[in-house]
Amino acid sequence: MAYDFQGTFTASQFKRLQTYIQNQVQLIDSRIAHLKVELERIGDLAFAYDAGGVPKAYANDPPTTYCGKLYGAYQALGGDVEYDLQVRKTSDPVFLLTGSETKPVQMVSNGEVLGGLGLNNATSAGLVQNLRNWVEGDLQRRRNSLERKIRRAIDYGEQLKAEINELVLLKKDIETEGSLGFYFAAIENLKNDRQYLAITNDEKNLDPHGKGAYAPEFPYMPGPKGTPAASYGRSRDGFVVPEQE
């Protein structure tokens, strides 16, 4: 794989990756523009819930968007948005409400009470199953498949927004955490730190292929002021070959 390294690499390996990334920066604006157009095509479908988790409102984009078309088809086929299509975004998750030492958790944030073991519902479950059997295929085609498409479309829209936000952040200045400049500066600081040996300074012995990136760390400093190296390794001054003075 191209640039197939993570936290352990040589300086010249990273330089190649840095050059590639810097060449791609010029494409960020075009990529953002494309993602925004795609987001407009997908559209959105949002629900608002009260404190008890009951839907109180929902908003849908025009019927020309993908979500709008799915929503219209769902309603046309008899789907009840308020009761059957209660979707949530990642910014509004369902979670367990906090309990205490004397009161265990009994409810989740959408208002549902946690059930216990042993529901003893075999009789009613069998009856309902028999009632549903002959319409199961119809429910699958008319409701379940559309619900899955709607949820996937909403999830896709959220991914598009997340990618747009990430790209905008990458273009910020070097002082902004999360920008490309911030990351490059952080790597440069680690490379210049002689105590941090995961990044090998290979200025003396160039190693752009990273052949010695995982060489063992020397417990001492070989060289003119120390014992010559008897094996390959990494020191505070970079990659060392055997018997190197």
Image (spheres, helix red, strand yellow):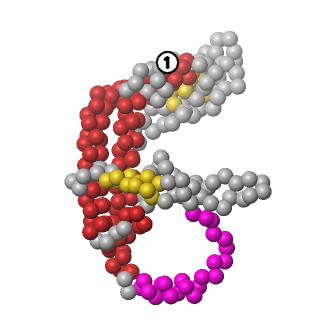
100 horizontally vs 243: left or right: right
Q: Position of residue 13 (x, y in %)?
A: 45, 29
Q: Taking the image as drawn, is residue 11 in sight?
A: no
- In the picture, which quadrant includes the C terminus? top right
Please check the rendered image and state whether residue 127 is part of the magenta-colored stretch, yes or no.
Answer: yes
Q: Nearer the viewer, residue 19 or 29?
A: 29
Quarter holding residue 239: top right
For the record, the magenta segment spans: 112-133
Q: Quadrant of the N terminus?
A: top left
Amino acid under label 1?
Glu
Q: Image point 69% across, 15% down: which residue?
A: 226
Name above or below for residue 191 compared with residue 72.
Answer: above
Q: Is residue 116 visible?
A: yes
User: Residue furthest toward the right?
Assistant: 102
Pick whichever, 232 or 111, lies toward us. Answer: 111
Residue lying at the far left of the rendered structure = 64
Provide the secondary structure element on which disc 1 rests. loop
State yes or no: residue 118 in magenta: yes
Q: Residues within 10 Å of mark 1 (few under 14, many from 20)?
A: few
**Spot occupied by residue 131 in the image (x, y as percentages of width and height):** 44, 86
- Tag count: 1
Residue 70 lies left or right of residue 170; in this view the side is left
Position in image of residue 4 (x %, y %): 45, 39
The foreground one among 119 and 55 is 55
Identify the residue at image location x=30%, y=56%. 67
Image quarter for residue 81? bottom left
The spot of residue 92 in percent (x, y) is 49, 49
- Quarter-of-image position of residue 217: top right
The residue where tag 1 is placed is 203
Query: Which residue appears at 55% of the width and 85% of the height?
Result: 124
Q: Residue at x 45, y 58 (%)?
A: 55
Give whichever of 221, 5 is nearer the camera: 5
